[in-house]
Image (tube, rainbow, N blue to C red):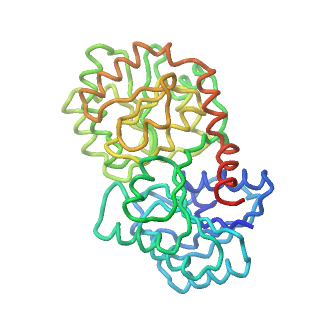
Amino acid sequence: MVVVVAPSYPYRGGIADTTDAFVETLLKQNQKVVVVSFSVLYPKLLFPGKTQFSEEHKTLSYKSVRLINTLNPYSWWKTAKYINLLNPNTVVFRYWSPWLALSYGTIARLLKSKKIAWIDNALPHERKLGDKILLKFFLDKINVIASMSEKVSSTLKVYTKKPIKTLFHPINNRLPDPIDKATAVTTLGLDSKIKHLLFFGIIRPYKGLDILIKSLPTLLKKRPNTQVLVVGEPYESMKHYRALAVSLNVSDYILFHDSFVPNTEIPLWFSACDWVIQPYKSATQSGITPMAIHYSKPTIVTDVGGLAEGITAETGLVSKADPESFGKTLIKALEKSEAFQNPKAFSKLKKEKSWHAFCQEFISDFLS
């Protein structure tokens, strides 16, 4: 048996969604799995978004128990007791924030089973005092580590001598299928005569929305028939972004849809766009690139972290993380869009980076 310690439904967002895909795929590969999730993940006062929970209604095909309260040490002891009673061969901790380190580290110290740390982010993008100490506390009682990018693995090697295996970020094939582009454009009320660039996902400072806005004067001199779609829930104020767009006279070329996008609406935005763009200032890996591949959309990423690991020469472009370079890369992308429309290139990635392939490698490296 494998116990996966991670958020699952009714929690929403990339971690919960990919945990669900991971567990479903393990089950299909004849693994017995139980998920241990959270009764309280983030207290409301500390959560920057509108809600942590999904509005969708679904029934899980696996057992998921909500035990961990990150604020209550007694729940950590109860969680460890529950896991030990299950007597699993392996416990997988899904780690992405120092907020989890005390609860995870304490639980790990009380477990008898083999313990794997699946690290999404070794250190947060917005660093705080104590982040490194908390990471070390968690890793101290872990047996082996899995990451999804070379960037994360190289960071971890600074803080631990535990064995590390670098995997990859799988393609989320559980998303709804793409729809006809013309239908998506019409449904969203967009202009079918212009090109659309999609900036998608939670809006946070490290994602470089200011770089994107500052790059638009360079882009629009050559490609005025372009619109940027900024789509996602902000975890910061949008006022300075809107003011920046006005000050640069580019606000008419940006559509701000600053709210959370449920899975049912994701195909509209990805099907309508011509390119997916990620002007990040820092990164580990990104869940947006696999989404773009799922919808067979080329991607522009910056040369930070492990972003470039997610694309090939046929599925995307890499830019420096500054406005001028990014603007020039946008121009190049729009001028050479046809070179990035090869279905075989995307199909190859979908197969190589599928959840099936990920879990086969995970089982071989960690569970066999």
**123 to 136, vertically: above or below:** above
Q: Could you say where residue 269 lies in the image, as x and y percent from the top left?
A: 52, 32
Outermost residue on the left side: it is 247
Q: Could you say where residue 243 lies in the image, as x and y percent from the top left?
A: 23, 39
Residue 291 position by quadrant = top right
In this rendered view, identify the residue nearer to me: 258 or 22.
22
**268 to 224, vertically: above or below:** below
Report whether 39 appears left or right of 133: right
Report whether 303 appears left or right of 285: left
Report whether 180 appears left or right of 198: right
Report whether 304 appears left or right of 36: left
In this rendered view, identify the residue nearer to me: 65 or 46.
65
Looking at the rendered structure, the number of numbered marks drawn on it comes to 0
Residue in the picture at 67% in, 68% down: 90
**161 to 102, vertically: above or below:** above
Question: Which quadrant, please, contains the C terminus?
Answer: bottom right
In this rendered view, identify the residue nearer to me: 279 or 236.
279
Q: Could you say where residue 189 lies in the image, as x and y percent from the top left?
A: 50, 26
**197 to 45, vertically: above or below:** above
Question: Which quadrant, please, contains the N terminus?
Answer: bottom right
Q: Could you say where residue 204 lies in the image, as x and y percent from the top left?
A: 36, 49
Residue in the picture at 46% in, 13% down: 193
